[in-house]
Image: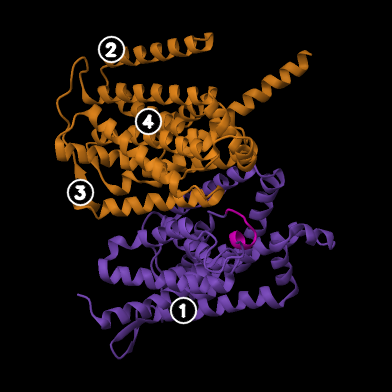
Chain colours: A purple, B orange
Amino acid sequence: MFSLDLLLDAVVIGVLLGCFYGAVSLGLSVSFGLLDVPHVAHPAFLVLASYAVYFLNENYAVDPLVAGLLITPIFFLLGLAAYRLYYETFEKRGSDASVRGIAFFFGIAFIIEVLIILQFGVDQRSVTASYIGKAWRLSDIRVPYRLLVAFAVATALTMLLTLYLSRTFMGRAIRAVAQDQEALRLMGANPIKVKQWAFGIATAVLGIAGALLIIVAPVDPTLDRAYIGRTFCVVVMAGLGSLGGTLVAAIILGVAESIVLTLFGASWAPAISFAMLLGILAVRPQGLFGRRS
Amino acid sequence: MKRNDIAFWIGAVVFLAAVLVMTQVVANQYPFFAGYVILQSIALAVAWSILGGYAGYVNFGTSAFYGVGVYASVFMVSAFGAPLPLQILTGAAVGALMGLALGLLTLRMQGIFFSIATIALTIVIETTITNWRYVGGAAGIQIQRPAVTSPFDSYVQMLFFVQAVLVVLAVAISRYIQNSWIGRGLQALRDDELAAECSGVPTLRLKLLACVISGALMCAIGAPAAMYLQYADPGSAFNLNYSVTTLAMSLIGGTAHWAGPIIGAILLGTTQQVLTVTISSEVNLLVLGLMLVLFVVGAPEGIVGLINKLRGHRKEGEI
C-alpha cells in the first residue's frame, strides 16, 4: 500500500544509499570520466576489494573500515600496474585499439569473477562489526546503522577526493591531463605518468568503497554485474569528469531505486540503474553536468 | 559463380551431409548433446562478428538476443504449440526488430557507450522476463518436446542437424557480407566513421542493417535451445557468460575474415567441453577469460591474423 510515511522512508533510505553509490562510483568517475579509460572492470575490482575486506575480517577480526584502509595501498599499486598494461598494449597503438581495450577490461572482470568463485565459492559473504545489524529510530523512520556508516564514510571520501583534485598540485595535474594532454606535454610534464598516478588513486579509493559495499549488504562473486549498471549510470548521468555531479547523480539513482523497490518489489530492482542508463544515453549522453557539449 | 563460391557451397553441402549421416549412424547420444553446444557457439560467434567484427561495435548483448530467442520459442510453444521451424522464424523476426531497436537507440553512441548500452539492454530485458508470469517468471518453465519427425531417431539429433543448418546460414550470410559492398562499407566505418560518411558511405543504414542481421541470427540461434534443454529460466537464458564466450571466440579467431569466428569457436568450444567434463566449469571459464585477455593483448588480429602474418613472412622470405 502506498502511504506518505512509506514514501518518506524510501526517500531517506534512498538518499543514504545514493551517497554510498556515489562512493563506489568515484573511482570510475576518475578513470572513465577524466581519463577516458573504458574501465568495465571497475565493479569487478570493487567486489575484489570487498572479498579482501571479508578475508581480513573473517580471519583476523579486523574492523571492515580498517581493513578497507589497509588494502588501499595494494589497490593503488594494482591500479598503477593495470594502467601501465592498458597504456602499453592499447592506448599507445591508437584508435583502433579502443575496441579491444573494452574487450580487455571485460576479460579482466571475468577473470576476477572466476578467481573469486574458485577461492571463496559462490555463496554470499558478509562481515561482522558492532554497527552491523542494528538500527537507529527517528520517529517512524528506521535507519540501519550500516547505512549511516556507509553514508558518513562515503560523503567524507567524496569530499576528500574533490579537495585532492582541486587543491593539490598532483590533483590539478590530473584535471589538466583530462582537459588537454598535449598541452601538458608541452609544459614539459609527462602526461602518461600523471594518468598512471590518477588511475592508481582511482583504484585505491576502491579499497574503502569495497569495505562499504560489504558493510551495506552481503556480497557474492557476480555482484559486479549489477554494479556495472549502477556505477556507469552514476558517472554518465553526472557527466564525464564531474565529481560533484557524481554525488547528485548517485542520490537520484539511490532515491529512484528505493522508491521503485518500495512500490513494485525487489524483482524490478536490478533493471532500474540499467534502464536509467539507457534513457540518459539516448536522451542526454553528455549527462547533467557534462564537460562536453 | 566464382570458383571460391562453388568451393564454399560444396563444402557447406558436404558438411550438412556429414552431419545428417552422423545422426543416422551414431547411436550414442552424448556427441549430439556436446556437438549441439559447439555448433551453437560457432553460429553465435559468426553472427556476433557481423556487427562486432566488421563494424567494430563491441556488442556485450549476445545473451540478450540469445535469451529473447529462447523465450520467443517458449512463448510460441505455450501459446500456440508452434512447431520448431515456426519457433525459429519467430525468433528471427523478434531478433530483427530488437536489432533495429538497438541500432536506433544507439545511433549516437560509439565505443564504450554502445557496449555498456548493450549490457543495460540485457539486464532490462532479463528483468522484464523475470517479472512476466506467463512464461514462467523467475522460477522458469518446463517445455514438452513433441514427437520427433523421421528420418531422425531422437529429438536431440534433429536439433543437432537444425543447428548445423543455422551455422551454414550464418556463415553464408557473413561471407556474403564480407565480399559485398556492405562489408566494405562496414569496414570503412569501423576505421573512421566520419571519413566514411564524408566519402558517401551510408553509415547509418549500414549500421542498422548490421544490427538487424546480427540480431535476427542470434535470436534464431537461441530459439531451438528451449527444446534442447526442455526448460527455460531467465537466469540461464540471459547469462552474461554467452556474451563473454561469444566475444572471446570471435576475437581469438580473428574478426577480419569470416572464417575467424569459426576457428575460434571450434577451438574454444571444444576446449570448453573437454575442460568442463574433465576438471570443472569454473576452470573452463578461467581459461576462457585468460585466453581472451592474452589474445587481445598479444595477438590483436586473432588466429587469422597470426596465419596471415606467417604467410606474409614466408612471402618476404621467398622474394
Which amino acid, mark 3? Gly
Say whether disc 2 or disc 3 marks the residue closer to the N-terminus: 2
Disc marking residue B40: 4
Measure the C-alpha gap from mark 4 to mark 2.
22 Å
Which amino acid, mark 4? Gln
Task: Say which residue appears at 34% left-offset and 28% top-offset.
Answer: B36
Measure the C-alpha gap from mark 3 to mark 4.
24 Å
* Residue bearing mark 2: B25
Mark 1 belongs to which subunit? A
Q: Is residue A185 left or right of residue B308?
A: right
Mark 3 belongs to which subunit? B
* Residue bearing mark 3: B136
| Residue A107 percent across, percent down from the top left | 53, 46
| Residue A7 percent across, percent down from the top left | 29, 79
Q: Please name which of the two marks, 1 or 3, marks the residue nearer to the observer.
A: 3
Q: Is residue A143 left or right of residue A207?
A: left
| Residue A258 percent across, percent down from the top left | 34, 72
Q: Is residue B245 visible?
A: yes
Q: Residues within 10 Å of mark 1 (few under 14, many from 20)?
A: many
| Residue B43 percent across, percent down from the top left | 41, 29
The N terminus of chain A sits in image quarter: bottom left
Measure the C-alpha gap from mark 1 to mark 4.
47 Å
Task: Say which residue appears at 61% left-offset and 78% top-offset.
Answer: A160
Residue nearer the viewer, B204 or B40: B204
Q: Is residue B229 left or right of residue A52?
A: left
* Residue bearing mark 1: A151
